[in-house]
Image (spheres, grey):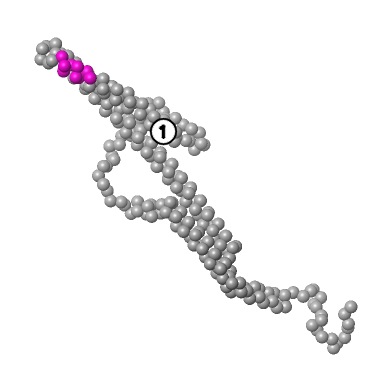
Amino acid sequence: RWANGVLLNPENKQPAVGQSFIGFELPLLSGFLTDEARTGLARAQLLEQTNEQVAREMANELLYKGTVAYLEWAYSSRQVELLRQAINLTRVRLQQTIVGYEAGDLAAIDTLETYTQLTGREAELFRAESELANARLMVEARLWADDGIFQNLPSGSLPQALTDLSTQPQLATSWQVSQLVNHPKLIQLQLQQQDLNLEARLKRQKLLPKLNVKYQFLA
């Protein structure tokens, strides 16, 4: 029980609401620049950015594969068209060769040579039509509606002619250069380097001796 009196030391008394105090502790060496918590938060932010770049890379890969599939379809379609034209011309030539042989102007070997060319091109057309069917399937495999339902190409649909494509080398535009600099793979490597720097910085901090300053005072 506390004694009562006016001459008692006030240090032995507490306020009616209780005694409060304020204090802090500050590391001066190990843990001053960074620690497990701050490094973990920074690495989590880097991981989030990395996941965004991975998603960009996957989207670019899908776009690239879709573009390649379409170009292969267009190439196969054009190849089949040219082979059919060549077969029609070869058939006309075969008929002319037969007429020339019957008239005595050409030898029999000429008709055989033309017929061999015709059968060879018909075999090429068969292979080209098979490649065209496969190329069409590859395009259809990448056709999806907004609701995620698989779609087929309309019957008889043909790819757009590739007559506007230039085979001449061209200088890269500023937009292409910017896309190359901001390529998601390069950004992922940069983020990975930053993550390694954070890890190395934390390890260096752990090698330092621990020296903490602590101060508390009554409020």
Using residue 125 as the reference point, say whether residue 151 is left or right of it: right
Q: Is residue 1 left or right of residue 179?
A: right
Could you say which quadrant of the image residue 78 lies in?
top left
The structure residue drawn at horizontal position 66% and vertical position 73%, both measured from the top left corner, is 24
Q: Quadrant of residue 135?
A: top left
**Residue range corresponding to the magenta coloring:** 108-116
**16 left or right, relative to 82:** right
Residue at the spot of label 1 = 138
Which amino acid does the dot numbered 1 rest on? Answer: Met
- Quarter containing the C terminus: bottom right
- Compared to 168, does 86 lie above or below? above
Q: Position of residue 11 (x, y in %)?
A: 79, 82
Give neighbour class at mark 1: few <14, some 14-19, many 20+ (Cα, 10 Å).
some
Is residue 159 inside the magenta stretch?
no
Residue lying furthest bottom in this view?
7
Q: Residue at x 26, y 28 (%)?
A: 82
Residue 78 seen: yes
| Residue 172: image location, x then y, percent | 30, 51
Left or right of 108, for residue 126: right
